[in-house]
Amino acid sequence: MQDFAVVYGKQNVRHILTDAIVDLSWSSHREEITRSMTVRLRNAPPIQVAGMLMCFGKRSKEQLLHYQNQFFHGPIISFEENEFTHEWELEAREIGWYLAKNKGTRPYLKGPAGSELQTYIKSTGIDFRCPDLGFSIDERYGTMAHSDIVLDVLQKAYEHTGYRFYLEYIRKDQSFYIVVAREGRNTIVPVFIQNQMEESSRGASIEDTYTVVTAQKWKDDKIVPSVTKANTGAINNLGRMEEIIEVEEKENPTTIATQKLVELSNPKLTKKITVKHEDHTLCGLRAGWLVLIQEEKYKSKWVIVSEQTTFSNGIYTVQLELERRE
């Protein structure tokens, strides 16, 4: 595999594992902050837990092992070696996995949510960057994993603004940083055509649909005020389903209720596809990315909810669960 490499590192030790690979797969999901990777190896050098797994695909003009080509970096969290066949199976997670393995003691976030989250995660020693998330937070958390706080703040951002966010891992020369990005804002946008698809199905869901939205502002255990917006046509078609949102002091309940009703009152169009490709520039594909599907002369926009990728003999086989993006 001339344009693809897997490297194992532990302290000052480095081993190239590419030729030992039996199979390699990774996955990501909207509700997770890291990608997971599974590697099966035969006749590999000794492996230790907490050793780093580093994966490279030829994404730039630089040499293959240049940092710009690295798309995965993270600890091996478990391994198993068959003592008869000497076949190894490794489980690895992106480096952000350590955010799930460390807790904060009753952290208090108060102020613009994006800057508060960035300041808090940076205080743990992680280079973490977060844009303005569009709302203010005033939350005293219990003792909980840093990753759970990240997910909670991003869920609150979705509830307040209607936009979902995910984490991208950006490799630098000697380090990396994690950045919060809005779903569908990836700079490389894959276009999949029908002859790349082995499977394709479409559907719709009202699991996350609401036809009535109420925005409430609370002060001293009293509601001041409460605004309800309803989509009459959607109620007649889908039934009455109400979402209640608590808005912050500086937010306008009418604006929040109106915006959220537009975003929530339509059924979600879904799609599942399995595609094959040989494009190493897409090895960073993950949940949260926008993809385009070309059908005859029409391109439709979709956001990845979950992704499962297998790499073998230079071919990427990708299973995607998608949500329609207008």
Image (spheres, rainbow, N blue to C red):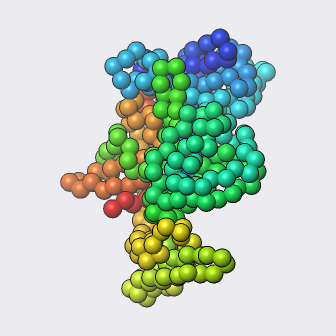
Residue 155 appears in which quarter of the rendering?
bottom right
- Side of 91 relative to 25 (left or right): right
Going 72% across and 45% down the picture, which residue do you hit?
104
Say which of 125 and 84 sits in front.
Answer: 125
Q: Is residue 228 above or below residue 164?
A: below
Q: Is residue 108 above or below residue 258?
A: above
Residue 312 visible, this angle: no
| Extreme-front residue of the structure | 220
Going 45% across and 63% down the picture, which residue do you hit?
162
Q: Position of residue 323 (x, y in %)?
A: 43, 59
Going 73% across and 43% down the picture, which residue do you hit?
103
- Side of 240 relative to 62 (left or right): right
Residue 48 appears in which quarter of the rendering?
top right
Going 60% across and 76% down the picture, which residue do you hit?
218
Say which of 272 and 282 sits in front.
Answer: 282
Please state, as top left, top right, bottom left or bottom right, where the C terminus lies in the image. bottom left
Q: Position of residue 217 (x, y in %)?
A: 55, 75
Residue 142 visible, this angle: yes
Q: Position of residue 90 (x, y in %)?
A: 67, 29
| Extreme-right residue of the structure | 83
Q: Is residue 243 above or below residue 67?
A: below
Say which of 238 and 220 sits in front.
Answer: 220
